[in-house]
Image (tube, rainbow, N blue to C red):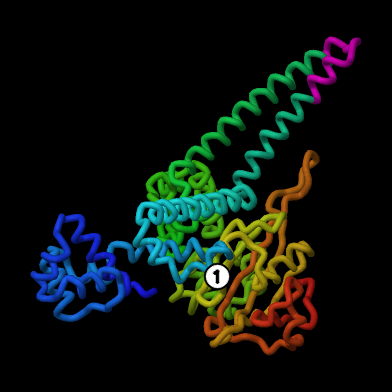
């Protein structure tokens, strides 16, 4: 039954609501009561001048009788019915149900909307628990402190003859670990509370930092000066950075940005980049820095100095994305695990071995990108912990640079992450260990 077929029902409801008899409305509209009765029972269609006349006598707009206030309600009911196979057979009677039982229909629609909101919230919270590196680190700190406290307490409780000196050491460890647990738990609760005010607009600290940099076109000219301002002041004045973890990450980024600018001054680096065709290997050798620093510097160049857009994506040792500067046409996932990123993960699997690859993204207008990737130590290895690695991938669209002629692999077999045929990766037949 179409929406217009319920016009008669709406006329009857409106007439009854204002206390108007059927015979009186028929007389005012210039038709017989029997004909109006057929209209009100949806047995005769109505439109044109007669509909306008009846609407005027009922003191409503004609559109309110043809579409009614239930138009949005019916659409919501259709969405709810699409989730249940048993309801599909009764879809033709959906508008009749909404017309006869508007209260029940509104209740079902409201429950459906609420369920969808809760599902979206659960999905966002699940993503946050799974992929937020800051949250993972906080949880790891709390769990480590609890484990250490339990181990120390077990030793003290189960060992009868403990040397007094060792006993004092264990008690000191208990005190230090208890303080660490309290501070870690407090920081974790504060972090979760900061993101719980509006779960519908949940964002991670990384996304806040990316929004902060995006608003500045990924370039910070104030940090390029010989006497730059304190990065902490820039972070404190940034409206995009609303949480303490985001401000902490932004401060670390700005400090590294400043170190890169000191090692590779803007004017000299931009000229060298144009002369080297944005080749990160040549630039790293010219400035005596590691390739990761060159990646960051190229991504921070204004487009007019770089000759076009430059993208950058970085991940930690677990493969979780920690930085994203996208370029048009190169789709970057929110967290990771996407076909175009396979050079990044290939570099992650073989630290210090640079990777150069051409990635071609299919579609109605296929686009090609030259990518450089490398995995390097983020922190120097110490005696008390393993080496911390991070990988980065530079993304240069065709047009920003001239793409080399690389031997392509067969379509469908070049990507080792999934068998999608709209993502074709092409790479060098061999990779040199001493540079890109």
What stretch of residues is rendered in magenta?
151-165
Residue 94 at x, y = what percent? 43, 66
In this view, the residue farthest toward the front is 34
Q: Quadrant of the N terminus?
A: bottom left
Residue situated in front as seen by the camera: 288 or 402: 402
Q: Is residue 99 above or below residue 208?
A: below
Q: Residue at x 62, y 76 (%)?
A: 279
In this view, the residue farthest toward the right is 161
Q: Residue at x 66, y 56 (%)?
A: 320
Q: Quadrant of the C terminus?
A: bottom right
Residue 345 at x, y = what percent? 72, 65
Q: Is residue 201 visible?
A: no
* Residue 427 belongs to magenta span: no
Q: Which residue is mark 1?
A: 311
Q: Is residue 375 above or below residue 255?
A: below
Q: Secondary structure at mark 1?
A: strand
Q: Residue at x 68, y 61 (%)?
A: 391
Residue 407 at x, y = what percent? 74, 88
Residue 125 at x, y = what percent? 56, 48
Q: How many marks?
A: 1
* Residue 160 belongs to magenta span: yes
Q: Is residue 405 above or below residue 66?
A: below
Q: Is residue 364 visible?
A: yes
- Magenta stretch, overall SS: helix
Q: Residue at x 80, y 40 (%)?
A: 383
Q: Is residue 162 left or right of residue 89?
A: right
Residue situated in front as seen by the camera: 367 or 395: 367
Q: Is residue 68 left or right of residue 431?
A: left
- Decide: few, some or many residues near mark 1? Use Cα within 10 Å; few <14, some 14-19, many ≥20: many
């Amino acid at each position: 039954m179409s929406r217009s077929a319920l016009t008669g029902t709406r006329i009857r409801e409106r007439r009854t609501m204002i206390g108007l008899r059927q015979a009186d409305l028929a007389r005012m509209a210039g038709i017989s009561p029997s004909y109006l009765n057929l209209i009100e029972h949806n047995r005769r269609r109505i439109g044109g001048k007669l509909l306008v006349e009846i609407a005027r006598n009922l003191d409503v707009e004609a559109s309110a009788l043809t579409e009614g206030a239930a138009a949005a309600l019916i659409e919501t009911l259709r969405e709810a019915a699409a989730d249940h196979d048993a309801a599909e057979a009764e879809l033709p009677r959906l508008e009749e149900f909404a017309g006869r039982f508007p209260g029940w229909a509104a209740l079902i629609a409201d429950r459906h909307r609420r369920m969808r909101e809760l599902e979206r919230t659960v999905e966002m919270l699940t993503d946050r628990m799974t992929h937020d590196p800051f949250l993972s680190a906080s949880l790891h700190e709390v769990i480590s402190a609890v484990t250490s406290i339990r181990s120390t307490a077990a030793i003290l409780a189960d060992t009868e003859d403990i040397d007094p000196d060792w006993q004092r050491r264990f008690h000191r460890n208990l005190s230090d670990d208890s303080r660490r647990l309290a501070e870690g738990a407090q920081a974790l609760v504060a972090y979760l509370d900061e993101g719980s005010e509006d779960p519908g607009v949940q964002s991670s600290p990384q996304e806040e930092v990316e929004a902060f940099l995006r608003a500045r076109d990924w370039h910070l000219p104030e940090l390029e000066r010989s006497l730059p301002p304190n990065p902490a002041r820039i972070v404190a004045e940034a409206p995009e950075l609303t949480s303490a973890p985001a401000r902490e990450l932004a401060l670390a980024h700005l400090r590294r940005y400043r170190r890169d600018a000191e090692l590779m001054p803007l004017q000299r680096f931009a000229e060298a980049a144009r002369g080297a065709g944005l080749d990160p290997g040549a630039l790293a050798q010219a400035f005596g820095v590691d390739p990761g620093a060159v990646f960051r510097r190229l991504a921070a160049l204004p487009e007019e100095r770089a000759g076009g857009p430059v993208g950058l994506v970085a991940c930690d040792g677990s493969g979780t994305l920690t930085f994203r500067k996208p370029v048009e046409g190169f789709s970057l996932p929110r967290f990771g695990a996407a076909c175009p990123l396979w050079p990044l993960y290939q570099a992650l699997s073989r630290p210090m071995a640079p990777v150069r690859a051409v990635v071609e993204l299919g579609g109605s207008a296929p686009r090609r990108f030259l990518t450089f990737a490398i995995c390097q130590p983020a922190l120097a290895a110490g005696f008390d912990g393993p080496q911390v690695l991070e990988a980065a991938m530079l993304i240069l669209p065709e047009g920003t640079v001239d793409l080399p002629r690389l031997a392509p692999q067969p379509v469908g077999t070049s990507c080792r992450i999934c068998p999608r045929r709209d993502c074709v990766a092409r790479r060098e037949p061999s990779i040199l260990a001493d540079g890109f």
